[in-house]
Image (cartoon, rainbow, N blue to C red):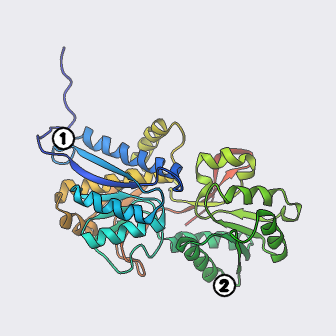
Amino acid sequence: MNTPPSPPGAERSDGPPVRIGALVPLTRPGWAEAGHHLLAGLELAVSEVNDTGGIGGRPLELVVRDTAADPRRAAAAVDELARLGVAALAGEYHSVVARSAAARADALGLPFLCSSAVLDALTEQPTEWVARLAPPQSRGWRIYADFLLDAGHGRIAVATQPSVYWASGTRILRDHLAARGGTVAELDTGALTPAALCDALADSGATALLLLVGQPDPAVPVVRSVRRDPRLADVLIGAPAGQPEFAGWAAALGGDGAAIPFLRYLPEQFTPLGVRVGAALRERLAEAPSFVAYEGYDTVAVLADVLRTHGTDRARVAGAWPRVAVEGTRGLIRFSRTPGIGVRQWTWAPVQVVDRDPADPGRFRVLHAG
C-alpha cells in the first residue's frame, strides 16, 4: 500500500515539544461554558499547527490549567507553568483573573497573549510582555451605550455585584451616557432580592436594566422576576458582558432569555479561515461556536506564527508583538499601543451588539456594530 505524502511543512524533528501554557476556567465558580469554548479553540489550532509541521518540526503542546475564576489560583498556575518551561501563556476569560495572571507574567518575564478578558487596566503599568486579542472594555461598552441611546434609552439601571470588572463597566456607561444627558442608577443584587430589585427598578423610571452580574446566579432569577412583573413589561433587559451568548442561557431561560442585547466580538463576515474554523469548532463542540472559541483559535494562530518566525526565547516572543501580522478567523491581527491601555492591543477587533430572536431563541440577530 502506498503511503500518502505528508502535508507541506509536516517534516518532524526529534526535538522536544514547544509548550504553551493555557489558562482556562473549567470549573465553578468560573464560567465553565465559556472556558470549554475557549479551550476548544485553543486545542483545534494546536492540532492544526501540528498537522502542518509544528514549530520548526517540533510539536506544539498545550499545558492546560483550570483557573476556576480564582485570581490567586491563576497566579500560582503562572508560576508553575513558568517553571515547566512554557514559551508563552495563552487564554483566560475572566478579566479579574487575567489581570492577576498578567501581573505574574510581567514579573516573571513570560509572554502572555490574553484571549478574552477585556478589562482596560489588565496591568497596573505598561508592559511589553502582555498582548491581548479581545477589545478593551471601554471600547465595547461605549459601543453598547451608543446602541442604548440610539434606541431611546437614556435612563439606565444596572443590577450589580461587587467586582472591579462590574465597577469599571458601570463607570464607562455612566461617563459615556452622561455626556449625552443619560443617567445610570445602581441596584445592588447583594442587598436586594429579585422582587425588591423589581420594586426599585419600577420606582427608578429607567427604561433599561443591564445585568452586571454573574451567570447563572443572580442573572437568571433577576431576568425571570423582571419578565414576570407587569410594571416592567416595557423595560429592556441588556447584558453587555455577553451572558446570553452561550447555550446554557437559552436552556435556563427559554423565551425569557431572548431579546436581551449583549456584546460579542464577531465580524459581519468571517474570513475564509473563519468559515473553515467555524465548521470545525461546531463539530468539536457539538453546538454553534461562541466568539470565545474563535478567540482561542486566533490566540494559538498568533503564537504559532511568532514562534515559527522568531523562535521560542521568551524575550524574543514578547519583542515580536509589534511585528505581528496574522490573518485570523475574524480579520488581520496586528498589535499596537492604545492610549490608556498598558498591554499590546489588537485595536480593531470586531464588536457587535446582538440578541437572541424571540421567534427562535437559537438564532442571533445583529442589532448594532462598531
Q: Is disc 1 placed on a helix, strand or loop?
A: loop
Query: Which residue does the numbered mark 1 point to in the structure image?
Result: 9
Q: Residue furthest right?
A: 230
User: Hey, what amino acid is under mark 2?
Assistant: Ala
Q: How many circles with numbers are drawn on the protein?
A: 2
Residue at image point 61% right, 61% down: 214
| Residue 347 can be seen, yes or no | no
Figure quadrant of residue 173: bottom right
User: Hey, what amino acid is under mark 1?
Assistant: Gly
Query: Which residue does the numbered mark 2 point to in the structure image?
Result: 178
The x, y position of residue 85, in whole percent, is 21, 56
Distance from Cα at disc 1 to Cα at disc 2: 56 Å
Who comes first in sequence, dot 1 or dot 2?
1
The x, y position of residue 175, in whole percent, is 61, 83
Say whether residue 11 is left or right of residue 370.
left
Q: Nearer the viewer, residue 272 or 132?
A: 132
Disc on res. 356: none
Q: Nearer the viewer, residue 358 or 195?
A: 195
